[in-house]
Image: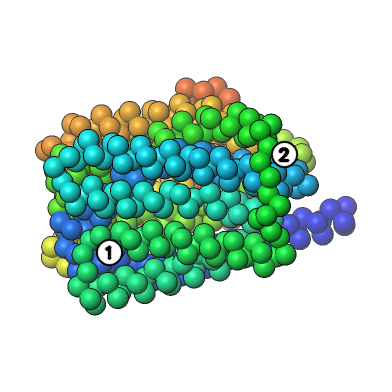
Protein backbone atom coordinates (compact mmCIF):
# COMPACT_ATOMS: atom_id res chain seq x y z
CA UNK A 1 0.00 0.00 0.00
CA UNK A 2 2.80 2.41 0.93
CA UNK A 3 4.62 1.64 -2.31
CA UNK A 4 1.47 2.32 -4.35
CA UNK A 5 0.95 5.64 -2.56
CA UNK A 6 4.53 6.65 -3.25
CA UNK A 7 4.11 5.75 -6.92
CA UNK A 8 0.90 7.80 -7.09
CA UNK A 9 2.60 10.79 -5.49
CA UNK A 10 5.48 10.46 -7.94
CA UNK A 11 3.05 10.40 -10.86
CA UNK A 12 1.21 13.44 -9.53
CA UNK A 13 4.49 15.31 -9.13
CA UNK A 14 5.37 14.49 -12.75
CA UNK A 15 1.95 15.67 -13.96
CA UNK A 16 2.12 18.91 -11.97
CA UNK A 17 5.68 19.60 -13.14
CA UNK A 18 4.80 18.84 -16.75
CA UNK A 19 1.69 21.00 -16.53
CA UNK A 20 3.78 23.77 -15.04
CA UNK A 21 6.12 23.74 -18.03
CA UNK A 22 3.21 23.77 -20.45
CA UNK A 23 1.49 26.59 -18.60
CA UNK A 24 4.73 28.54 -18.40
CA UNK A 25 5.16 28.24 -22.16
CA UNK A 26 1.62 29.32 -22.86
CA UNK A 27 1.69 32.23 -20.43
CA UNK A 28 4.90 33.55 -21.98
CA UNK A 29 3.60 32.96 -25.50
CA UNK A 30 0.27 34.54 -24.64
CA UNK A 31 1.63 37.73 -23.12
CA UNK A 32 4.43 38.26 -25.63
CA UNK A 33 2.41 37.21 -28.68
CA UNK A 34 -0.62 39.20 -27.55
CA UNK A 35 1.43 42.36 -27.17
CA UNK A 36 3.05 41.93 -30.58
CA UNK A 37 -0.13 40.84 -32.36
CA UNK A 38 -2.04 43.83 -30.98
CA UNK A 39 0.73 46.00 -32.35
CA UNK A 40 0.54 44.18 -35.70
CA UNK A 41 -3.25 44.63 -35.87
CA UNK A 42 -3.06 48.33 -35.08
CA UNK A 43 -0.26 48.77 -37.64
CA UNK A 44 -1.96 46.85 -40.47
CA UNK A 45 -5.48 48.11 -39.78
CA UNK A 46 -8.67 46.07 -40.03
CA UNK A 47 -8.44 45.46 -43.80
CA UNK A 48 -4.85 44.23 -44.11
CA UNK A 49 -5.06 42.38 -40.79
CA UNK A 50 -8.15 40.67 -42.20
CA UNK A 51 -6.08 39.46 -45.19
CA UNK A 52 -3.47 38.08 -42.78
CA UNK A 53 -6.07 36.27 -40.66
CA UNK A 54 -7.95 34.98 -43.69
CA UNK A 55 -4.79 33.32 -45.04
CA UNK A 56 -4.10 31.63 -41.70
CA UNK A 57 -7.70 30.46 -41.34
CA UNK A 58 -7.90 29.18 -44.93
CA UNK A 59 -4.76 27.06 -44.60
CA UNK A 60 -6.04 25.87 -41.22
CA UNK A 61 -9.14 24.45 -42.91
CA UNK A 62 -6.98 21.89 -44.72
CA UNK A 63 -4.44 21.16 -41.96
CA UNK A 64 -6.08 17.86 -40.85
CA UNK A 65 -4.74 16.36 -44.10
CA UNK A 66 -1.24 17.16 -42.85
CA UNK A 67 -1.73 16.26 -39.19
CA UNK A 68 -3.52 12.96 -39.97
CA UNK A 69 -5.06 12.84 -36.49
CA UNK A 70 -1.96 11.18 -35.06
CA UNK A 71 -1.19 13.40 -32.06
CA UNK A 72 -2.80 11.51 -29.19
CA UNK A 73 -2.43 8.14 -30.93
CA UNK A 74 1.35 8.62 -30.95
CA UNK A 75 1.34 9.45 -27.23
CA UNK A 76 -0.80 6.42 -26.43
CA UNK A 77 1.24 3.98 -28.55
CA UNK A 78 4.60 5.18 -27.21
CA UNK A 79 3.32 4.91 -23.62
CA UNK A 80 2.16 1.36 -24.31
CA UNK A 81 5.15 0.28 -26.46
CA UNK A 82 8.19 2.44 -25.61
CA UNK A 83 10.51 -0.09 -27.26
CA UNK A 84 8.88 0.71 -30.63
CA UNK A 85 9.63 4.44 -30.35
CA UNK A 86 11.84 4.76 -33.45
CA UNK A 87 9.41 2.84 -35.63
CA UNK A 88 6.40 4.80 -34.38
CA UNK A 89 8.06 8.21 -34.83
CA UNK A 90 9.65 7.32 -38.17
CA UNK A 91 6.42 6.03 -39.62
CA UNK A 92 4.46 9.03 -38.35
CA UNK A 93 7.02 11.42 -39.84
CA UNK A 94 6.75 9.90 -43.33
CA UNK A 95 2.96 9.80 -43.20
CA UNK A 96 2.67 13.41 -42.06
CA UNK A 97 5.20 14.63 -44.62
CA UNK A 98 3.17 13.03 -47.40
CA UNK A 99 0.02 14.53 -45.89
CA UNK A 100 1.62 17.97 -45.71
CA UNK A 101 2.59 17.90 -49.40
CA UNK A 102 -0.90 16.83 -50.47
CA UNK A 103 -2.48 19.44 -48.20
CA UNK A 104 -0.32 22.27 -49.58
CA UNK A 105 -1.21 21.34 -53.14
CA UNK A 106 -4.92 21.29 -52.30
CA UNK A 107 -4.67 24.72 -50.64
CA UNK A 108 -2.99 26.20 -53.73
CA UNK A 109 -5.64 24.78 -56.04
CA UNK A 110 -8.65 25.81 -53.95
CA UNK A 111 -7.51 29.36 -53.12
CA UNK A 112 -6.83 29.98 -56.82
CA UNK A 113 -10.47 29.10 -57.48
CA UNK A 114 -12.27 30.91 -54.65
CA UNK A 115 -10.20 34.14 -54.66
CA UNK A 116 -9.30 34.28 -58.33
CA UNK A 117 -9.52 38.09 -58.44
CA UNK A 118 -7.54 38.80 -55.27
CA UNK A 119 -3.81 38.43 -55.88
CA UNK A 120 -2.81 39.55 -52.38
CA UNK A 121 -4.98 36.97 -50.62
CA UNK A 122 -3.88 34.21 -52.99
CA UNK A 123 -0.19 34.94 -52.51
CA UNK A 124 -0.48 35.19 -48.73
CA UNK A 125 -2.34 31.90 -48.52
CA UNK A 126 0.08 30.04 -50.79
CA UNK A 127 3.11 31.28 -48.84
CA UNK A 128 1.61 30.24 -45.50
CA UNK A 129 0.80 26.77 -46.88
CA UNK A 130 4.57 26.09 -46.78
CA UNK A 131 4.26 25.75 -43.00
CA UNK A 132 2.34 22.50 -43.57
CA UNK A 133 5.57 20.86 -44.75
CA UNK A 134 7.12 21.44 -41.31
CA UNK A 135 4.40 19.76 -39.26
CA UNK A 136 5.96 16.24 -39.40
CA UNK A 137 8.53 17.39 -36.82
CA UNK A 138 5.70 17.89 -34.32
CA UNK A 139 5.84 14.12 -33.78
CA UNK A 140 8.80 14.83 -31.50
CA UNK A 141 6.50 16.89 -29.31
CA UNK A 142 4.24 13.88 -28.92
CA UNK A 143 7.22 11.84 -27.76
CA UNK A 144 8.01 14.42 -25.08
CA UNK A 145 4.35 14.32 -23.99
CA UNK A 146 4.52 10.54 -23.62
CA UNK A 147 7.45 10.99 -21.22
CA UNK A 148 5.59 13.77 -19.35
CA UNK A 149 8.58 16.02 -20.16
CA UNK A 150 7.04 18.95 -21.94
CA UNK A 151 9.81 21.27 -20.76
CA UNK A 152 11.71 20.36 -23.92
CA UNK A 153 8.76 21.46 -26.03
CA UNK A 154 8.59 24.64 -23.95
CA UNK A 155 12.20 25.50 -24.72
CA UNK A 156 11.84 24.87 -28.46
CA UNK A 157 8.58 26.78 -28.81
CA UNK A 158 9.78 29.68 -26.70
CA UNK A 159 12.84 30.16 -28.90
CA UNK A 160 10.58 30.19 -31.97
CA UNK A 161 8.25 32.62 -30.24
CA UNK A 162 11.02 35.08 -29.42
CA UNK A 163 12.57 34.92 -32.89
CA UNK A 164 9.28 35.33 -34.78
CA UNK A 165 7.98 38.16 -32.63
CA UNK A 166 11.24 40.07 -32.82
CA UNK A 167 10.94 39.74 -36.60
CA UNK A 168 7.36 41.04 -36.43
CA UNK A 169 8.50 44.06 -34.44
CA UNK A 170 11.24 44.70 -36.99
CA UNK A 171 8.67 44.40 -39.80
CA UNK A 172 6.47 47.03 -38.14
CA UNK A 173 9.38 49.40 -37.60
CA UNK A 174 10.40 49.05 -41.25
CA UNK A 175 6.82 49.57 -42.52
CA UNK A 176 6.61 46.13 -44.17
CA UNK A 177 3.57 44.74 -45.98
CA UNK A 178 1.20 41.88 -45.16
CA UNK A 179 3.27 39.31 -47.03
CA UNK A 180 6.24 39.89 -44.73
CA UNK A 181 4.13 38.90 -41.72
CA UNK A 182 3.01 35.75 -43.52
CA UNK A 183 6.65 34.77 -44.15
CA UNK A 184 7.39 35.37 -40.48
CA UNK A 185 4.62 32.93 -39.56
CA UNK A 186 6.35 30.31 -41.73
CA UNK A 187 9.70 31.11 -40.09
CA UNK A 188 8.06 30.63 -36.69
CA UNK A 189 7.09 27.08 -37.68
CA UNK A 190 10.59 26.40 -39.06
CA UNK A 191 12.40 27.60 -35.93
CA UNK A 192 10.02 25.63 -33.73
CA UNK A 193 10.70 22.45 -35.69
CA UNK A 194 14.45 23.02 -35.51
CA UNK A 195 14.16 23.51 -31.77
CA UNK A 196 12.30 20.23 -31.31
CA UNK A 197 15.01 18.41 -33.25
CA UNK A 198 17.70 20.05 -31.11
CA UNK A 199 15.94 19.02 -27.88
CA UNK A 200 15.53 15.47 -29.15
CA UNK A 201 19.24 15.25 -29.91
CA UNK A 202 20.01 16.84 -26.53
CA UNK A 203 18.53 13.72 -24.95
CA UNK A 204 21.06 11.62 -26.86
CA UNK A 205 18.50 10.48 -29.44
CA UNK A 206 18.89 10.56 -33.21
CA UNK A 207 16.40 11.00 -36.03
CA UNK A 208 18.67 8.86 -38.20
CA UNK A 209 17.50 5.66 -36.46
CA UNK A 210 13.85 6.35 -37.20
CA UNK A 211 12.44 3.77 -39.56
CA UNK A 212 9.31 3.49 -41.64
CA UNK A 213 7.13 0.41 -41.27
CA UNK A 214 4.26 -0.33 -43.62
CA UNK A 215 2.68 -2.50 -40.93
CA UNK A 216 2.89 0.36 -38.45
CA UNK A 217 1.57 2.80 -41.08
CA UNK A 218 -1.51 0.63 -41.64
CA UNK A 219 -2.01 0.45 -37.88
CA UNK A 220 -1.71 4.23 -37.39
CA UNK A 221 -3.94 5.10 -40.33
CA UNK A 222 -6.43 2.43 -39.29
CA UNK A 223 -6.63 4.07 -35.87
CA UNK A 224 -6.56 7.65 -37.13
CA UNK A 225 -8.86 7.74 -40.14
CA UNK A 226 -11.80 8.74 -37.96
CA UNK A 227 -9.62 11.39 -36.33
CA UNK A 228 -8.66 12.73 -39.77
CA UNK A 229 -12.31 13.08 -40.76
CA UNK A 230 -13.40 14.39 -37.39
CA UNK A 231 -10.41 16.75 -37.35
CA UNK A 232 -11.44 18.10 -40.74
CA UNK A 233 -14.96 18.70 -39.47
CA UNK A 234 -13.64 20.23 -36.24
CA UNK A 235 -11.49 22.65 -38.21
CA UNK A 236 -14.56 23.60 -40.24
CA UNK A 237 -16.48 24.68 -37.17
CA UNK A 238 -13.35 26.26 -35.66
CA UNK A 239 -12.15 28.20 -38.71
CA UNK A 240 -14.98 28.40 -41.23
CA UNK A 241 -16.40 31.55 -39.62
CA UNK A 242 -13.43 33.70 -40.67
CA UNK A 243 -13.37 32.23 -44.16
CA UNK A 244 -17.12 32.75 -44.61
CA UNK A 245 -16.84 36.30 -43.27
CA UNK A 246 -14.14 37.00 -45.81
CA UNK A 247 -16.26 35.66 -48.62
CA UNK A 248 -19.55 37.27 -47.53
CA UNK A 249 -18.61 40.46 -45.64
CA UNK A 250 -15.07 41.36 -46.71
CA UNK A 251 -11.59 41.47 -45.20
CA UNK A 252 -12.35 44.41 -42.88
CA UNK A 253 -15.02 42.39 -41.08
CA UNK A 254 -12.56 39.48 -40.81
CA UNK A 255 -10.00 41.82 -39.26
CA UNK A 256 -12.45 43.10 -36.62
CA UNK A 257 -13.86 39.66 -35.85
CA UNK A 258 -10.45 37.98 -35.68
CA UNK A 259 -9.20 40.36 -32.97
CA UNK A 260 -12.10 39.26 -30.74
CA UNK A 261 -11.53 35.60 -31.60
CA UNK A 262 -7.82 35.85 -30.80
CA UNK A 263 -8.54 37.16 -27.31
CA UNK A 264 -11.30 34.59 -26.84
CA UNK A 265 -9.22 31.62 -28.00
CA UNK A 266 -6.00 32.68 -26.32
CA UNK A 267 -7.18 30.72 -23.26
CA UNK A 268 -7.54 27.45 -25.14
CA UNK A 269 -4.03 26.44 -24.12
CA UNK A 270 -5.35 25.69 -20.62
CA UNK A 271 -7.30 22.50 -21.44
CA UNK A 272 -4.58 21.42 -23.87
CA UNK A 273 -1.91 21.77 -21.18
CA UNK A 274 -4.01 19.98 -18.55
CA UNK A 275 -5.06 17.06 -20.72
CA UNK A 276 -1.59 16.65 -22.29
CA UNK A 277 -0.19 16.20 -18.78
CA UNK A 278 -3.03 14.09 -17.38
CA UNK A 279 -3.58 11.76 -20.35
CA UNK A 280 -0.79 9.23 -19.61
CA UNK A 281 -2.03 8.91 -16.01
CA UNK A 282 -5.64 8.65 -17.23
CA UNK A 283 -4.62 5.76 -19.46
CA UNK A 284 -3.09 3.99 -16.46
CA UNK A 285 -6.01 4.76 -14.11
CA UNK A 286 -8.30 2.64 -16.27
CA UNK A 287 -6.38 -0.40 -15.06
CA UNK A 288 -7.00 0.54 -11.41
CA UNK A 289 -10.74 -0.02 -11.62
CA UNK A 290 -13.80 1.62 -13.12
CA UNK A 291 -14.49 3.61 -9.94
CA UNK A 292 -11.07 5.28 -9.96
CA UNK A 293 -11.31 5.85 -13.70
CA UNK A 294 -14.69 7.58 -13.49
CA UNK A 295 -13.57 9.67 -10.54
CA UNK A 296 -10.56 10.92 -12.50
CA UNK A 297 -12.76 11.74 -15.49
CA UNK A 298 -15.21 13.72 -13.36
CA UNK A 299 -12.35 15.57 -11.67
CA UNK A 300 -10.96 16.43 -15.09
CA UNK A 301 -14.35 17.73 -16.31
CA UNK A 302 -14.83 19.79 -13.14
CA UNK A 303 -11.36 21.31 -13.34
CA UNK A 304 -11.80 22.25 -17.00
CA UNK A 305 -15.24 23.80 -16.39
CA UNK A 306 -14.00 25.84 -13.42
CA UNK A 307 -11.12 27.21 -15.50
CA UNK A 308 -13.53 28.14 -18.30
CA UNK A 309 -15.88 29.99 -15.94
CA UNK A 310 -12.93 31.78 -14.33
CA UNK A 311 -12.05 33.17 -17.76
CA UNK A 312 -15.48 33.79 -19.30
CA UNK A 313 -17.21 35.65 -16.47
CA UNK A 314 -14.75 38.56 -16.06
CA UNK A 315 -14.05 38.86 -19.81
CA UNK A 316 -17.79 39.25 -20.47
CA UNK A 317 -17.90 42.44 -18.39
CA UNK A 318 -14.65 44.02 -19.61
CA UNK A 319 -14.82 43.05 -23.30
CA UNK A 320 -15.70 46.46 -24.77
CA UNK A 321 -13.21 48.60 -22.79
CA UNK A 322 -10.57 45.91 -23.28
CA UNK A 323 -10.88 46.05 -27.05
CA UNK A 324 -10.77 49.84 -27.02
CA UNK A 325 -7.68 49.83 -24.80
CA UNK A 326 -5.78 47.26 -26.85
CA UNK A 327 -6.83 47.92 -30.44
CA UNK A 328 -8.35 51.39 -30.56
CA UNK A 329 -11.52 52.82 -32.08
CA UNK A 330 -11.11 51.05 -35.41
CA UNK A 331 -11.75 47.70 -33.64
CA UNK A 332 -14.38 48.88 -31.14
CA UNK A 333 -17.07 46.71 -32.76
CA UNK A 334 -15.13 43.62 -31.64
CA UNK A 335 -16.13 44.26 -27.99
CA UNK A 336 -19.64 42.73 -28.09
CA UNK A 337 -18.32 39.91 -30.28
CA UNK A 338 -15.72 39.04 -27.63
CA UNK A 339 -18.30 39.19 -24.81
CA UNK A 340 -20.35 36.52 -26.58
CA UNK A 341 -17.60 34.45 -28.21
CA UNK A 342 -15.76 33.92 -24.91
CA UNK A 343 -18.54 31.52 -23.78
CA UNK A 344 -17.67 29.11 -26.56
CA UNK A 345 -14.57 28.35 -24.50
CA UNK A 346 -16.65 26.57 -21.86
CA UNK A 347 -17.61 23.91 -24.39
CA UNK A 348 -14.13 23.81 -25.92
CA UNK A 349 -12.69 23.03 -22.49
CA UNK A 350 -15.20 20.24 -21.88
CA UNK A 351 -14.67 18.84 -25.38
CA UNK A 352 -11.05 18.09 -24.51
CA UNK A 353 -12.22 15.80 -21.69
CA UNK A 354 -14.62 14.04 -24.05
CA UNK A 355 -11.80 13.63 -26.56
CA UNK A 356 -9.55 11.97 -23.96
CA UNK A 357 -12.33 9.56 -22.98
CA UNK A 358 -13.08 8.62 -26.58
CA UNK A 359 -9.40 8.04 -27.30
CA UNK A 360 -8.87 5.92 -24.21
CA UNK A 361 -12.01 3.88 -24.93
CA UNK A 362 -11.16 3.46 -28.64
CA UNK A 363 -14.48 5.07 -29.60
CA UNK A 364 -12.98 7.67 -31.89
CA UNK A 365 -15.67 7.15 -34.52
CA UNK A 366 -17.98 9.24 -32.33
CA UNK A 367 -15.72 12.26 -32.88
CA UNK A 368 -16.77 12.16 -36.51
CA UNK A 369 -20.41 12.45 -35.44
CA UNK A 370 -19.83 15.26 -32.91
CA UNK A 371 -17.68 17.30 -35.25
CA UNK A 372 -20.07 16.70 -38.12
CA UNK A 373 -22.92 18.06 -36.02
CA UNK A 374 -20.84 21.09 -35.03
CA UNK A 375 -19.70 21.80 -38.58
CA UNK A 376 -23.19 21.51 -40.08
CA UNK A 377 -24.75 23.76 -37.43
CA UNK A 378 -21.96 26.33 -37.68
CA UNK A 379 -22.12 26.59 -41.46
CA UNK A 380 -25.92 26.71 -41.46
CA UNK A 381 -26.20 29.46 -38.83
CA UNK A 382 -23.37 31.43 -40.45
CA UNK A 383 -25.21 31.39 -43.77
CA UNK A 384 -28.30 32.78 -42.04
CA UNK A 385 -26.70 35.36 -39.75
CA UNK A 386 -23.50 36.65 -41.37
CA UNK A 387 -25.25 38.54 -44.20
CA UNK A 388 -27.33 40.48 -41.63
CA UNK A 389 -25.19 40.62 -38.51
CA UNK A 390 -21.62 40.10 -39.74
CA UNK A 391 -19.16 39.14 -37.02
CA UNK A 392 -21.82 39.04 -34.29
CA UNK A 393 -23.74 36.45 -36.27
CA UNK A 394 -20.58 34.38 -36.63
CA UNK A 395 -20.07 34.53 -32.84
CA UNK A 396 -23.63 33.28 -32.24
CA UNK A 397 -23.00 30.40 -34.64
CA UNK A 398 -19.75 29.56 -32.87
CA UNK A 399 -21.24 29.31 -29.37
CA UNK A 400 -24.23 27.23 -30.49
CA UNK A 401 -22.19 24.87 -32.66
CA UNK A 402 -19.54 24.33 -29.96
CA UNK A 403 -22.22 23.49 -27.40
CA UNK A 404 -23.83 20.98 -29.74
CA UNK A 405 -20.54 19.35 -30.78
CA UNK A 406 -19.10 18.94 -27.30
CA UNK A 407 -22.05 18.37 -24.99
CA UNK A 408 -25.46 17.88 -26.59
CA UNK A 409 -24.11 15.41 -29.16
CA UNK A 410 -23.61 12.84 -26.37
CA UNK A 411 -27.38 12.33 -26.40
CA UNK A 412 -27.09 10.56 -29.76
CA UNK A 413 -24.50 7.98 -28.64
CA UNK A 414 -25.52 5.69 -25.78
CA UNK A 415 -21.96 4.78 -24.65
CA UNK A 416 -21.28 8.54 -24.23
CA UNK A 417 -24.25 9.14 -21.95
CA UNK A 418 -21.99 8.77 -18.92
CA UNK A 419 -19.57 11.38 -20.20
CA UNK A 420 -22.49 13.61 -21.14
CA UNK A 421 -23.74 13.43 -17.56
CA UNK A 422 -20.25 14.19 -16.23
CA UNK A 423 -20.06 17.28 -18.44
CA UNK A 424 -23.55 18.34 -17.31
CA UNK A 425 -22.43 18.06 -13.69
CA UNK A 426 -19.30 20.02 -14.58
CA UNK A 427 -21.47 22.92 -15.80
CA UNK A 428 -22.64 23.22 -12.20
CA UNK A 429 -19.10 22.91 -10.84
CA UNK A 430 -18.91 26.55 -9.59
CA UNK A 431 -21.72 25.67 -7.16
CA UNK A 432 -21.28 21.92 -6.71
CA UNK A 433 -17.54 21.81 -5.99
CA UNK A 434 -17.53 24.45 -3.18
CA UNK A 435 -20.51 22.71 -1.52
CA UNK A 436 -18.67 19.36 -1.67
CA UNK A 437 -15.56 20.93 -0.14
CA UNK A 438 -17.59 22.49 2.69
CA UNK A 439 -19.24 19.14 3.41
CA UNK A 440 -15.86 17.42 3.60
CA UNK A 441 -14.56 20.11 5.92
CA UNK A 442 -17.64 19.69 8.10
CA UNK A 443 -17.23 15.92 8.24
CA UNK A 444 -13.55 16.39 9.12
CA UNK A 445 -14.42 18.52 12.14
- Say what secondary structure mark 1 lies in: helix
152 relative to 283 in the view: left or right: left
The disc placed on residue 180 is 1
353 relative to 114 in the view: left or right: right
Q: Gap between marks 2 and 1, in whole Å?
A: 49 Å
Q: Residues within 10 Å of mark 2 (few under 14, many from 20)?
A: some
Which coloring applies here? rainbow
Q: Nearer the viewer, residue 94 or 2?
A: 94
135 relative to 285 in the view: left or right: left
Q: Quarter-wise, where is residue 325 in the image? A: bottom left
Q: Residues within 10 Å of mark 1 (few under 14, many from 20)?
A: some
Point out the frontmost of discs 2 and 1: 1
Q: Position of residue 397 (x, y in %)?
A: 27, 38
Q: Nearer the viewer, residue 311 or 138?
A: 138
Q: Position of residue 284 (x, y in %)?
A: 73, 44
Q: Position of residue 287 (x, y in %)?
A: 76, 39
Q: Residue at position x 78%, y 47% from top? A: 83
Q: Residue at position x 25%, y 45% from top? A: 242
Q: Quarter-wise, where is residue 358 in the image? A: top right
Q: Position of residue 379 (x, y in %)?
A: 27, 32
Residue 5 visible? The answer is yes
Who comes first in sequence, dot 2 or dot 1? 1
Q: Residue at position x 51%, y 44% from top? A: 97
- Above or below: residue 392 compared with residue 28: above
The residue that label 2 is drawn on is: 286
Q: Which quarter of the figure is the C terminus placed in?
A: bottom right
Residue 27 visible? The answer is no
Kindly indicate whether the residue at mark 1 contacts the one at mark 2 (C-beta within 8 angstroms): no
Number of marks in picture = 2
Amino acid sequence: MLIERLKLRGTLREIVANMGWLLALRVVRTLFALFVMVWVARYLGAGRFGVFQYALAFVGLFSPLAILGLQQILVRDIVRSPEARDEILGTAFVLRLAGGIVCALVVIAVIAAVRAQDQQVRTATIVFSLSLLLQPFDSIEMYFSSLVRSKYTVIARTIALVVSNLLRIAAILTASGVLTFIWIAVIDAAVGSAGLVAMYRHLGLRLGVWRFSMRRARHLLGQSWTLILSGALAIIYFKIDQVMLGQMSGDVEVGIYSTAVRLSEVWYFLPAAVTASVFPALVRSRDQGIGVYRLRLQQLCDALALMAFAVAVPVTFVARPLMLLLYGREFEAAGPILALHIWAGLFVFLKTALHQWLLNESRLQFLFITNGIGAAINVGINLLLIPRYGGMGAAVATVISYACASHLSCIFYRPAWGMGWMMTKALAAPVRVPIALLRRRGEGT
